[in-house]
Image: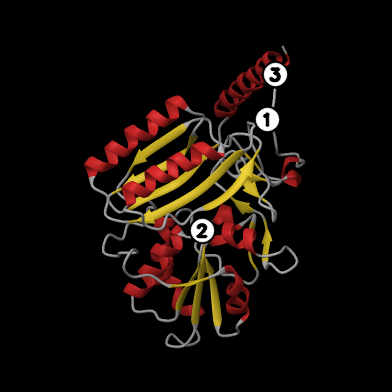
Amino acid sequence: MKSKNYKIVSLYSFFPFQEKLILNLKNKLHEIENENDLSGLLIFASEGINGTICAENNVIDIVINLLSKYTGNKNLNIKANFSKKKVFKKLKIKIKKEIVTMGVPEINPSENNGTYVDSADWNKLIKNQNTIVIDTRNHYEVSIGTFQNSINPNTRNFREFPKWVDDHLDTHLENKESTNIAMFCTGGIRCEKATSFLKKKGYKNIYQLKGGILKYLDDIPKEENLFEGECYVFDKRVALDQELEKGSYMICHACGMPVSIQDQKRKEYIKGIQCHFCIDQFSDNDRKRFKERQKQIDRLKVENHKIYQD
């Protein structure tokens, strides 16, 4: 059986999206899924589109063309990489209040955000002594890889970011008027909102890495890039290395935290049941359930392998 090459495309676009059109697009995408091997996760809201899709190249083209029509040919901020395996089980489409949840309704990223900085100019900006660099991602994403000398707000989710700004940002600024504030995230969407929020609060000299870490790793040679570690992604691959290939992390199915190869060798780690992050989080009854679940997963893998061999 010949292995397929799947294209994985992350995208987002801020634009006014009417409810009737949201439902219409959702139906059309499921029609494409029914006839093709299309999977992924897409989030629609009145403020736009966000998500990742996985399919062969010709199917990706069909989907991108469709999305472009609904966005009025707005920039979809596409980042692409490839995998020999599917990175999602199926296509999920969620309709929410926001395409990335910050909980600050009065900002408008499509009209007011930070200055974009291309990958080629990012190193110079973040090496500048007058620049502070902020990682706008969640703590578990930061823990497996980030840019040198960046500030980690240590948030559990993006909704906590505005409070971190209110409570801590000024302590990192020597001069509020002249210090550069450079921000980055996985693909750029969180920075659209984060920089818009800061501008609304009156901060100046705000910059964002265009296309995020994924674009940066694609653009900048390994020997020149200043990103250390791996980049967390929200699909089966868990994290990508410097070449945008599947990295060394797995997800602990008990707590959802990424665990490295080294973490998997620790005595606390039992596949599917616990890791060193959650050793004290669950009861014995919980672990019994996790153990049964893992048995079923392993059994299914063996059965599927037999079918493939036959």
Name the residue at 77% across, 41% down: 265
Q: How busy is the neighbourhood of tag 1: few (under 14 within 10 Å), some, or many (20 plus)?
A: few
Q: Is residue 278 left or right of residue 47?
A: right
Nearer to us: label 3 or label 2: 3
Task: Please state which amino acid type lies under the numbered disc 3.
Answer: His
Residue depicted at 58% across the width and 73% down the height: 122
The numbered mark at residue 305 is 3
Q: Which residue in the protein does label 2 denote?
A: 137
Q: Quadrant of residue 226?
A: bottom right
User: Mark 1 to mark 3: distance in Å?
Assistant: 15 Å
Q: Nearer the viewer, residue 67 or 17?
A: 67
Residue of label 1: 3
Mark 3 or mark 2: which comes first in sequence? 2
Q: How many marks?
A: 3
On-image quarter of the N terminus: top right
Kind of residue indicated by mark 2:
Arg
Between marks 3 and 2, how big is the CA–CA gap? 37 Å
Which quarter of the figure is the C terminus placed in?
top right
Crowding at dot 3, Cα within 10 Å, few <14 / some 14-19 / many 20+, comes out as: few
Q: Quadrant of residue 274?
A: top right
Residue 128 higher or lower than 195, as above or below: below
